[in-house]
Image (cartoon, rainbow, N blue to C red):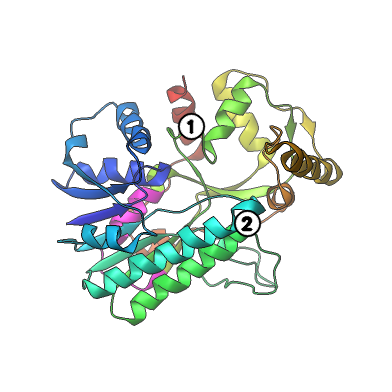
Amino acid sequence: MILVTGGTGLVGAHLLYNLCKTNSQIVAIYRNKETQNTTKEIFELYGDTSNYQNIIWKKADIVNIPEIELVFNGITHVYHAAAKVSFDSKDSEQLRKVNVEGTANIVNLCIKNNIEKLCYVSSIATLAKTPGVNFIDEDCEWNPEGDHSDYSLTKYGAEMEVWRASQEGVPVVIVNPGVIFGFGAWNVNSSQLFKKIKKGLSFYTNGTVGVVAVQDVVNAMILLMNSNISNQRFVLVAQNSNYKAIFSLIAQHLNVTPPKFKAGKTVTEIAWRLNSLIATLTFGTLDFGLNKYSARAAHKKRYYNGNNIKKSITNFSYTPFDMVIKEICSKLS
């Protein structure tokens, strides 16, 4: 039997939809009933809810050992997609609790229950550019001297826990996706961008980022879990694109005006500091969506090589990014 953590998030919900098509019983955990709405919405956006009943929902939190321990009864395979995503320094403790301690709990239970295989959803945030190498890939290791966000630190810490599982006899695969684009979960992560552009986004930055469709991430995870491949990581990036091109493509498919003004480093440095000040004074934030790390990342030019998965899994291919954006825009109401 399969266990999915993070099944109420973007990746987890799309994963559940695809797993439900070929599996009669899948266990997914949730913290409160409201979070299941995202999963239901994504099934509805696919236009097929017939297999939703294949999900066995169990209330549990990965940081609560007694709760999560009960969930492992009868489980043979685990997809660990649960994580907290935040670049706000106020969330550092919670990031460590969920991403590192929560993953450690999952790993310990995988070892204890002799799980046949574990797939962990990490991030390109754990990879660093190697001097003299143009593209970041699976061989580019964590740089302990880098200026890392708490999110990056905790995802790296989580990876160390997963590798510990491999040393204890549990076969593992880790995927390191770029920025994930997919429909549903409209109020979190990259999905928020579509709403902002639809309302009218004026600015763009000159940075470059690796992008990938959520369907491709999910497909890679399932294929890797069903293969003989173990104890390896895979960068999942379909292409590298600058923010202006991404914003313009989204605006094109939404039939709205694309952002026209380039925000330089000085502007974004002022913006994240102002955002931080307002948050301190009013316990809220301005609608910049910026903090120290996101503001600086918006100007970085990093290029990723996601071809190894195609060499390792012969029937895997990436969806053209234009098609991905077109589909997402068609689902946005």
Which residue ends up furthest to the right in the rendered image? 266
Q: Which residues are magenta?
A: 217-232
Q: Estimate the x, y position of residue 6 in percent, counting from the top left.
A: 37, 49
Image quadrant of residue 45?
Answer: top left
Q: CA distance from mark 2 to mark 1?
A: 27 Å
10 Å crowding of disc 2: few (<14), some (14-19), many (20+): some
User: From the viewer's perspective, is 130 left or right of 53?
Assistant: right
| Nearer the observer, 296 or 273 | 273
Locate the N terminus and report the quarter of the image it occupies: bottom left
Q: Which residue is mark 1?
A: 186
Q: Name above or below for residue 34 compared with residue 105.
A: above
Numbered disc 2: secondary structure: loop
Q: Estimate the x, y position of residue 187 in percent, counting from the top left.
A: 51, 33
Does residue 230 show up magenta in the picture?
yes
Residue occupying the point 25% across, 55% down: 3
Residue occupying the point 70% across, 51% down: 297
User: From the viewer's perspective, is 1 left or right of 227?
Assistant: left
Marker count (numbered)? 2
At label 2, the amino acid type is Tyr
Q: Which residue is mark 2?
A: 303
User: From the viewer's perspective, is 196 left or right of 272?
Assistant: left
At label 1, the amino acid type is Trp
Q: Name above or below for residue 222 compared with residue 109.
A: above
Q: Estimate the x, y position of residue 181 in percent, counting from the top left.
A: 49, 40
User: From the viewer's perspective, is 71 left or right of 327?
Assistant: left
Does residue 307 show up magenta in the picture?
no
10 Å crowding of disc 1: few (<14), some (14-19), many (20+): some
